[in-house]
Structures are given as structure tokens and as C-alpha cells.
Image (cartoon, rainbow, N blue to C red):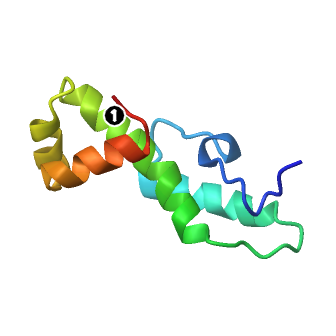
Amino acid sequence: MTSPVTNLNVSELHPVTPTQTLRESVADSLRSYFGQLDGHTPDDLYRMVVEEVEKPLLESVMNYCGGNQTKAAKCLGLNRGTLRKKLKHFDIR
């Protein structure tokens, strides 16, 4: 069984409503996450949150840009090489 401290799935913690901003959604999800810790202390929370947000961000931008990495890198404000490294890390094609 996986501990809630090491298994953060923001999308399962709190549904996003159409009028809710991303910031509000993340804040609500984190409040819910902390409420589920049952006395445990989170470990490496920053990395977990960034990875939960980064993969869908990259997937969405790549989809929006029709798979064009140069356009996606510009949209994200990243160097194309950095984007390629992140796509490989998350196994996004």
C-alpha cells in the first residue's frame, strides 16, 4: 500500500470546476492532501507537486502546438533543448 506522503495525485484530490482558477485548484488540492496525511510529514512535496503539474502542462502545450517542439518551447518560454529533455523525462512523444 502506498503512503499518501509519497503518492500525490492532485487530479484525484479535488475536482476542478469550470470557474475555478488553476491556482485555486492547486490550493484546494493541497489542503485536501494535507488533510489526508493523518499525522505523517510529507517528504519532497515540492518535487511531487511540480511533477504532477509539469507533465499535463507539457502534454497540453504539445497538443496545442500540434507536436511542434520549437513552437511549444517558445510558448513555454523554454529552450528547445530543455523542452526535449523534459519530454523525454516524462515519456511524451
Q: Position of residue 78 (x, y in %)?
A: 17, 55
User: Which of the 4 image quadrants contains residue 3?
Assistant: bottom right
| Residue 42 relative to residue 24: left or right | right
Q: Nearer the viewer, residue 63 or 88?
A: 88
Where in the figure is residue 48, as x and y percent of width and height? 57, 60
Q: Can residue 15 be seen in this snapshot? A: yes
Using the image, determine if residue 56 lies above or below residue 4: above
43 left or right, relative to 19: right
Picture layout, residue 46 above or below residue 79: below
Occupied quadrant, residue 49: bottom right
**87 and 19: which one is in front?**
87
Left or right: residue 31 versus residue 64 is: right
Residue positioned 41% across, 50% down in the render = 54
Residue 88: x and y, percent?
Answer: 36, 42
Nearest to the observer: residue 22 or residue 83: 83
Amino acid carrying label 1: it is Ser
Please tell me which residue is depicted at 44% across the width and 42% down the height of the picture.
90
Q: Say few, some or many: other residues with alpha carbon within 10 Å of mark 1 (under 14 / 14 to 19 / 20 or more).
A: some
> Going by the image, does 27 lie left or right of 4?
left
Seen in the picture, residue 29 relative to 69 is either above or below; the reply is below
- Percent across and percent down for residue 26 are 53, 56
Where does label 1 land, which residue?
60
Residue at 82% x, 60% y is: 36
Q: How many marks?
A: 1
Q: Residue at x 26, y 32 (%)?
A: 62
Task: Give 77 or 1, whichever is nearer the viewer.
Answer: 1
Instruction: Give the position of the C terminus as an image quadrant.
Output: top left
Q: Secondary structure at mark 1?
A: helix
Q: Is any part of residue 24 visible from this angle?
A: no
